[in-house]
Amino acid sequence: MSTPLEIASLIALILFIILVICLIPTVFYVRGKLAELILATQKLEADLQIIVQDSRQLVQNVNELTTRLNEQIDDAGKVVHAVVQWTDMVNRMVTAVGSIIEPPISKIARNISLFRLGLSVFTQVLCAKKSNNQPKEEEDHV
């Protein structure tokens, strides 16, 4: 039994040597690829740091912009409120002035209208008398 055991041990040893011989280049290849992967990861990390910084700066700029925009909207709201107050004041003033001025002007307009009506009736009567008097005068002259 020792011969088959020696042959099996020899075959196992040869297979182990072949395995080690195959594993050594594979380990070096994997080691090189891992080094490349680590280098690419470090480069990616540096690039990501730049992107993160730019993103933070962008967020800060957007926050500042929204703050300014909110301030301008608040200012516009104050202006609109002031304009509404001024408009209400002007409307009250126009109503007050209208209530003070409108009745006398309406009365004057009615009086002028009545005066015009009276004047037109007077001129019509005067013209009518004149036309009636002229034929009599013509008859007197004839």
Image (tube, helix red, strand yellow):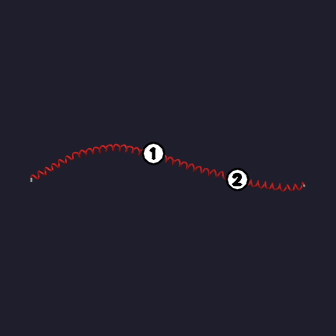
How far across and down, in percent of the image, does residue 89 sit?
58, 49
Q: Residue at x 12, y 51 (%)?
A: 7
Q: CA–CA distance between discs 2 and 1?
A: 61 Å
Q: Amino acid at mark 2?
A: Ala
Mark 1 Cα-neighbour bin, 10 Å: few <14, some 14–19, many ≥20:
few
Quadrant showing the C terminus: bottom right
Question: In the image shown, does 47 or 112 lie closer to the viewer?
Answer: 47
> Which image quarter: residue 56?
top left
How far across and down, in percent of the image, does residue 92 sit?
60, 51
- Asked which secondary structure carries label 1, the reply is helix
Q: Residue at x 62, y 50 (%)?
A: 94
Q: Specify whether 65 is left or right of 131.
A: left
Residue named by callout 2? 109
Q: Amino acid at mark 1?
A: Leu
Residue named by callout 1? 65
Q: Specify whether 12 is left or right of 134.
A: left
Q: Specify whether 102 is left or right of 21.
A: right
Q: Residue at x 57, y 50 (%)?
A: 87
Looking at the image, the residue that sits furthest to the right is 142
